[in-house]
Amino acid sequence: MVQQAIGDAQEHFGTVLAQQLERVERMKTSEPWLDFSTIKPIIIGILGGDGIGPFIAAEAQRVLEYLLRDPVRDGGVEFRVLEGLTIENRAKQLKAIPDDVLAEIRKCHVTLKGPTHTPEQGDGWPNIESANVAMRKELDLFANVRPVRIPRDGIDWTFFRENTEDLYAVGSQGVNVTPDLAIDFRVITTQGSERIIEAAFDYAKRTGKTKVTAVTKANVVKTTDGKFLNIAKEIAAKYPGIEMDSWYIDIMTAKLLDPARRAEFQVLALPNLYGDILTDEAGQIQGGVGTAGSANLGKRFAMFEAIHGSAPRMVETGRAQFADPSSMLRAGAMLLEHIGFEGLGHKLHCALDICGQYERKIVMTGRDTGATGKEFGDYLMTTVEDPAVEARWDAYVKES
Ligand code: IPM
Ligand code: MG
């Protein structure tokens, strides 16, 4: 009995290893970053997702279409609404991303995606893989970039979360060796670590930052985290102007809360799961996970999303129109920056801060005691249109 169980698990482990070694070979031959200045039209796909997703995605699309109205008219940018990335359709086809939807996604250069429902055992849906995780793997979106800024506290953090490896790489291929023994696989590769850590250092260099922090638990998880940390040290040696330091994930979660310390962190590079957890904490410090946006970048494709979930209860209780589109719009501002409209992206970030944190002429409460997403979108468009929007932002930040 036991021999049989071990034999089956070994065979499965062999398959997983072969798949991962193939992936390593693919990473070795990876292409250069796409140059958006040479692409016409740049195609932006909109994926509504589940729950409040279609509501906040539509609002984000409306604002982006408004900001990009000139390039859209001149044929430089095209918007496409992609249907079918819903839990109903995914469950029906038993696919994390149905094939036809994936084919449409691949025709877009970038996508803006609403939250999608991630099934877990026993919630009534088939236990298919998360659409986010599948999209990150399918399109090789290896860098999950999540900025968190609180100007009045001197906080300006940019997280570079590795997005394709770690416990996520084969997260749905673990084995129940026997009814008592469950094993998952944690995957860290040289190539996967190098590309995310390099992206973090490149960003630091490009934006004048002076420190990159590697976050692991290399004292305990010696092999995989040990590799990630060693690679961080090797890469740091190639960036003489940038200091590297290293923290363990447990104390890091504490230090983000330490007012004496936290403003020292600038760019952080971490394996997938630590990055997942730490960025929720950081988002909460900024004012809630609903205030943060997330960029999933690969060399060829990129996907931008809110970091919160699909809030099905808001839809069930008829409150979807009160869902706050801020996080999607943050993601939209990152999308603008990524495709070469840095100026517009920056203005949108400023307007989001003004409307959401400082001026707050309209306040969203998530219910009928506050504004609707559409009213907030209108407020944002009026604010972003103000030629002095950046100066207003500066003034608010100085005053606070
Ligand atoms: C995130 C989310 C996803 C993740 C879930 C929905 C699979 O929490 O984007 O951080 O764990 O990566
Ligand atoms: Mg998360």
Image (cartoon, rainbow, N blue to C red):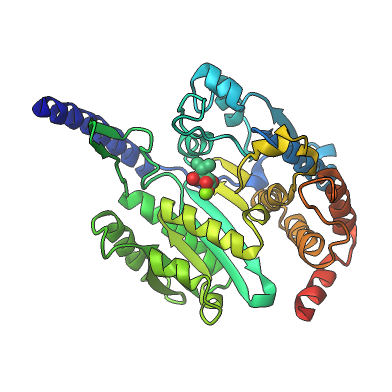
Residue nearest the observer in this picture, 289 or 66: 289
Residue nearest the observer in this picture, 241 or 7: 7
Placement of 200 over or under 276, stated as above or below: below
The residue positioned 67% from the left and 56% from the top of the image is: 291
Placement of 214 over or under 138, stated as above or below: below
Image location (x, y in percent) of residue 13: 22, 34
Instruction: Examine the image and state in which quarter residue 184 appears.
Output: top left
- 356 relative to 260 in the view: left or right: right
Placement of 193 over or under 131, stated as above or below: below
- Residue furthest to the top in view is 92
Viewer can see residue 77: no
Image location (x, y in percent) of residue 131: 53, 33
Instruction: Examine the image and state in which quarter residue 219 appears.
Output: bottom left
Residue nearest the observer in this picture, 288 or 133: 288
Image location (x, y in percent) of residue 228: 33, 58
The residue positioned 49% from the left and 23% from the top of the image is: 95
- 280 relative to 128 in the view: left or right: right
Viewer can see residue 301: yes
